[in-house]
Image: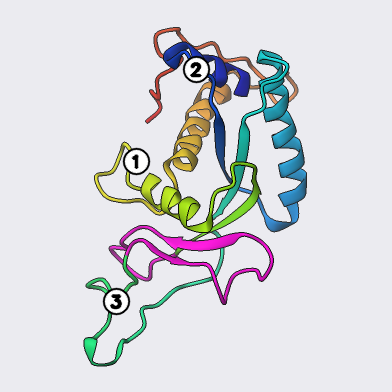
């Protein structure tokens, strides 16, 4: 899959990616090393299969929404509270100290406005950063990405690449379920060339 994506990128831009920034959802803390080793190795293999000395920098970030951490606005003396109308923290709030891991690179980002209830920040773990991003650069990039989701005119709570992966997986399930028998081999789905490089599942 990565090889096909790299080829598609080259076909549309006539350049190979210099950096690969990979947001991964659905990984528990106990799976970090296993997923990191296997998936980075697969990306490396895809890169070298295109060109033997092609080694773009990889930044691998795990995105987690299933946690119990909540952030609340702090009262600033007589100035009042910096909060949304319903009392949540402002979108774009980042916490990367005190409640984060003392030695690892992780941060909480609340990029969205919760219309109801208490907003839930997204926990980001940076498992690998070969591109040398500073904390501010990576946090700003992650927050800015939350503004470009195609289905919504407002900001969303997790980065769109993770949302798009959910949508693609859900769409693939419709194709596979129709043909899938429990004891049979997985079905290879052939897409029409006209939609192969288009996010038609959005």
- Marks 2 and 3: which is nearer the front? 2
The structure's colour scheme is rainbow
Q: Is residue 82 left or right of residue 61?
A: left
Residues under numbered marks 1 and 2 in contact, where contact means CB atoms less than 8 Å apart = no
Q: Looking at the image, which residue is at 52% across and 57% down?
A: 135
Crowd class of label 2 (few under 14; some 14 to 19; many from 20; radius 10 Å) = few
The residue under label 2 is 15
* Magenta span includes 99: yes
Q: CA distance from mark 3 to mark 1?
A: 25 Å
Q: Is residue 65 visible?
A: no
Q: Is 194 above or below relative to 147?
A: above
Q: CA distance from mark 2 to mark 3?
A: 47 Å
Q: Is 96 above or below relative to 160?
A: below
Q: Is residue 83 visible?
A: yes
* Magenta span includes 175: no
Q: Which mark is residue 87?
A: 3
Q: Earlier in the sequence, mark 2 or mark 3?
A: 2
Q: Is 135 above or below relative to 133?
A: below
Residues under numbered marks 2 and 3 in contact, where contact means CB atoms less than 8 Å apart = no
Query: In the rendered image, which quarter contains the N terminus?
Result: top right
Q: Looking at the image, which residue is at 22% across and 72% down?
A: 85
Crowd class of label 1 (few under 14; some 14 to 19; many from 20; radius 10 Å) = some
Q: Looking at the image, which residue is at 30% across and 61% down?
A: 113
The residue under label 1 is 149
| Closer to us: 200 or 186 | 200
| Closer to us: 200 or 76 | 76
Q: Is residue 95 left or right of residue 56?
A: left
Q: CA distance from mark 1 to mark 2?
A: 25 Å
Span colored in magenta: 91-120
Q: Position of residue 164 (x, y in %)?
A: 45, 36
Q: Position of residue 33 (x, y in %)?
A: 76, 49
Q: Position of residue 122 (x, y in %)?
A: 49, 59
């Amino acid at each position: 899959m990565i090889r096909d994506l790299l080829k598609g990128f080259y076909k549309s831009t006539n350049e190979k990616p210099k950096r690969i920034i990979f947001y991964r959802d659905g990984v528990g803390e106990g799976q970090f090393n296993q997923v990191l080793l296997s998936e980075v190795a697969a990306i490396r293999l895809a890169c070298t299969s295109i060109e033997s000395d092609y080694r773009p920098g990889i930044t691998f970030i795990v995105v987690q929404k299933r946690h119990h951490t909540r952030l609340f606005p702090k009262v600033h003396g007589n100035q009042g509270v910096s909060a949304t109308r319903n009392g949540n923290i402002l979108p774009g709030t980042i916490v990367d100290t005190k409640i984060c891991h003392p030695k690892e690179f992780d941060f909480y980002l609340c990029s969205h406005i919760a219309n109801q209830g208490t907003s839930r920040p997204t926990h980001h773990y940076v498992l690998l950063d070969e591109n040398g991003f500073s904390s501010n650069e990576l946090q700003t990039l992650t927050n800015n990405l939350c503004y470009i989701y195609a289905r919504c005119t407002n900001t969303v709570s997790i980065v769109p690449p993770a949302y798009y992966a959910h949508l693609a997986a859900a769409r693939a399930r419709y194709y596979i379920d129709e043909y899938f028998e429990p004891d049979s081999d997985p079905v290879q789905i052939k897409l029409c060339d006209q939609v192969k490089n288009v996010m038609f599942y959005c």
